[in-house]
Image (cartoon, helix red, strand yellow):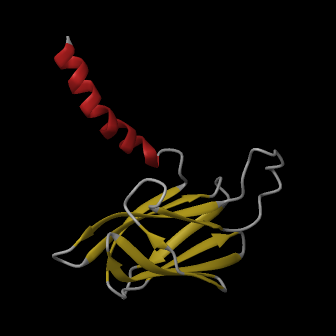
Amino acid sequence: MSRRFFALLLLLPLFLMGSQREGWDYSDTFVLKKDQVQHILIREKSKIHKLAFSWTLYANGGLVMHVSYDDRKFQPLLYTKYRLESFRIDLFSKPDTMSGKGESSPYLLLQFKAFDSEKKEAWLDLLLKGYGKNEISYVRGR
């Protein structure tokens, strides 16, 4: 009995990690080399928003990123530890159908998942919560 319980405890994080992408309108994983820019186009009705991100430095477990969304520029420092792994960007104002206080505006998360020091590549997840009001397309980094 205790062995089964122990095995269940070991497998529980795998089930929780798999369900993390559920509930997101869009999710994708990108593997970027240093200074490789990833371009993303997010369509909101007739307007197109431009997102671009890259990383420039990995030191002491931290990944220095450059993020540009429309005319706003950010330089987050991300780690693979919980609560330090993600950078949130509010995409645009709430849709008119979302008037409740508990509902937030559409947003995306950039999550730093891992760094391969041999290949010098960073693994990043892009998770988008758009409440079904947008389309997304992307062009692979150059």
The answer to whether residue 99 is left or right of residue 111 is right
In which quadrant will I find the N terminus?
top left
Q: Position of residue 24 (x, y in %)?
A: 53, 51
Question: Closest to the observer: 41 or 119?
Answer: 119
In which quadrant will I find the C terminus?
bottom left
Q: Position of residue 17 (x, y in %)?
A: 37, 44
Q: Is residue 95 above or below residue 48?
A: above
**Residue shown at 72% from the left, 53% from the top:** 104
**Residue shown at 18% from the left, 77% from the top:** 119
Which of the 4 image quadrants contains residue 114?
A: bottom left
**Residue shown at 64% from the left, 78% from the top:** 49
Total labels: the figure holds 0
Q: Position of residue 123 (x, y in %)?
A: 33, 68
Q: Is residue 108 above or below residue 8?
A: below
Q: Is residue 59 above or below residue 71?
A: above
Which of the 4 image quadrants contains residue 136?
A: bottom right
Residue projecting furthest to the front: 60
The answer to whether residue 7 is left or right of residue 141 is left
Question: Closest to the observer: 136 or 68?
Answer: 68
Q: Position of residue 100 (x, y in %)?
A: 81, 44
**Residue shown at 75% from the left, 44% from the top:** 102
